[in-house]
């Protein structure tokens, strides 16, 4: 762990001001106040999506139909005064249907023809990639460059995407026939894999009564894209203590079956563990969560809370795990019990 001893120096000398800290918390509160008018009982999911947005990441949401996934993303677009596009992924969807296409145009006055690039739906601030596993890998890959590089290459030209750029993709875990599982390289681009489950009985009753007895609330725009970019800049100034960074690295490294100090259950059940991007997202997400909970520095509690959404799609279990009904969430739970916490310290 010698390379982590200088984590304080690597983080830079900038510190977050009280004003910036309060502004970020106020921004979170404004968004939550609006979202709770239309989304009931999904506070944990909303917080994770907000963390990803403020950290500059992307979300993969897994859940059955009818759990307000589309409404959640659309509401974000309205509240944040950002452009929103929905892409319905189907088996016949082509990459050009996402990125855009070159068209031949003719000037009626001169008869001169020219090729013009017509931008696709990827050119928006918030993208809902609905049922992303229903389209072939070559079309899924059209999102890769956009998610990682914030640009699109078409016809040999580079087109920059306007920031903030936030992709939220959905998957239906029930119907597997005719689907194309996302490759590991694509999964790794998502900061979180969030599982949306059914509501509690009381929340389900409230939703049923609200949606069948009155019109949907009109949401107010409370923040701009510029505000979100400012928050993303502020988040990077949040301090990460050495012991927290060490814990995040140790947790991720122990998920790999090739690691010498891995637990025995990892060797038995895991075919592929999480990579460096998992550590980066644990720390970035921890910074946002720390601010949300009124702290100026990341705690091990933040890393533990975010371990499942960050790691569940990066830990690939093998046949032996499947035969024993062990999934990646169970492996993560065992890792959290197995990996010891380094000695506390802020230096």
Image (spheres, rainbow, N blue to C red):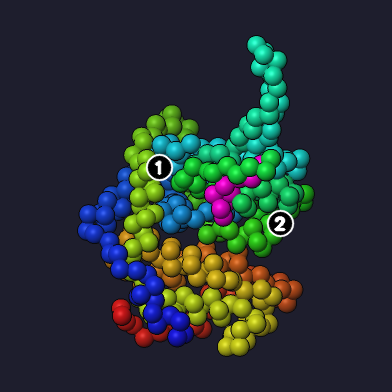
Residue for badge 2: 181
User: What is the x, y in percent for residue 148?
Assistant: 56, 55
**Label 1 Cα neighbours within 10 Å, binned few <14 / some 14-19 / many ≥20:** some
User: What is the x, y in percent for residue 165?
Assistant: 50, 46
Q: Earlier in the sequence, mark 1 or mark 2?
A: 2
Q: CA distance from mark 1 to mark 2?
A: 32 Å
Which circle marks residue 10 in the picture? none
**Label 2 Cα neighbours within 10 Å, binned few <14 / some 14-19 / many ≥20:** some
Is residue 147 highlighted in magenta? yes
Give above or below for 190 relative to 318.
Answer: above
- Name, please, the residue furthest toward the top: 109
- Name, please, the residue furthest toward the left: 18
Q: Nearer the viewer, mark 1 or mark 2?
A: 1
Rendered residue at 65%/29% (across/down): 116
Q: Nearer the viewer, residue 150 or 326?
A: 150
Give above or below for 266 relative to 193.
Answer: below
Helix, strand or loop for disc 1: helix
Report whether residue 11 is seen.
yes
Q: Nearer the viewer, residue 189 or 135?
A: 189
> Could you tell me which quadrant the C terminus lies in?
bottom left
Rendered residue at 41%/36% (across/down): 81
User: What is the x, y in percent for residue 98?
Assistant: 65, 40
Is residue 120 highlighted in magenta? no
Give the magenta range.
146-154
Residue for badge 1: 225
Left or right of 137 on screen, residue 210: left
């Amino acid at each position: 762990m010698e390379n982590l001893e200088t984590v304080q120096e690597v983080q830079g000398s900038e510190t977050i001001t009280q004003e910036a800290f309060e502004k970020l918390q106020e921004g979170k509160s404004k968004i939550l106040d609006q979202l709770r008018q239309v989304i009931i009982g999904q506070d944990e999911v909303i917080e994770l999506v907000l963390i990803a947005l403020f950290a500059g990441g992307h979300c993969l949401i897994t859940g059955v139909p009818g759990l307000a996934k589309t409404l959640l993303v659309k509401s974000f677009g309205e509240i944040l005064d950002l452009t929103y596009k929905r892409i319905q992924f189907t088996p016949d969807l082509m990459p050009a249907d996402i990125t855009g296409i070159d068209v031949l145009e003719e000037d009626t006055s001169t008869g001169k023809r020219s090729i013009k690039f017509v931008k696709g739906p990827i050119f928006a601030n918030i993208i809902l990639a609905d049922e992303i596993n229903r389209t072939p890998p070559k079309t899924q890959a059209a999102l890769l460059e956009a998610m990682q590089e914030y640009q699109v290459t078409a016809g040999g030209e580079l087109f920059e995407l306007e920031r903030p750029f936030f992709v939220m993709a959905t998957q239906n875990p029930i119907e597997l026939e005719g689907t194309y599982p996302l490759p590991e390289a694509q999964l790794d681009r998502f900061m979180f894999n969030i599982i949306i489950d059914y509501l509690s009985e009381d929340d389900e009753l409230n939703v049923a009564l609200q949606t069948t007895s009155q019109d949907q609330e009109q949401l107010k725009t409370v923040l701009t894209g510029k505000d979100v970019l400012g928050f993303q800049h502020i988040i990077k100034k949040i301090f990460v203590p050495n012991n927290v960074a060490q814990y995040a690295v140790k947790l991720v490294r122990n998920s790999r079956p090739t690691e010498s100090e891995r637990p025995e259950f990892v060797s038995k059940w895991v075919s592929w563990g999480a990579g460096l991007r998992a550590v980066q997202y644990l720390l970035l997400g921890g910074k946002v969560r720390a601010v949300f909970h009124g702290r100026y520095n990341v705690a091990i509690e933040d890393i533990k809370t975010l371990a499942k959404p960050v790691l569940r799609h990066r830990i690939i279990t093998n046949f032996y795990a499947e035969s024993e009904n062990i999934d990646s969430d169970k492996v993560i739970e065992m890792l959290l019990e197995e990996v010891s916490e380094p000695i506390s310290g802020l230096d």
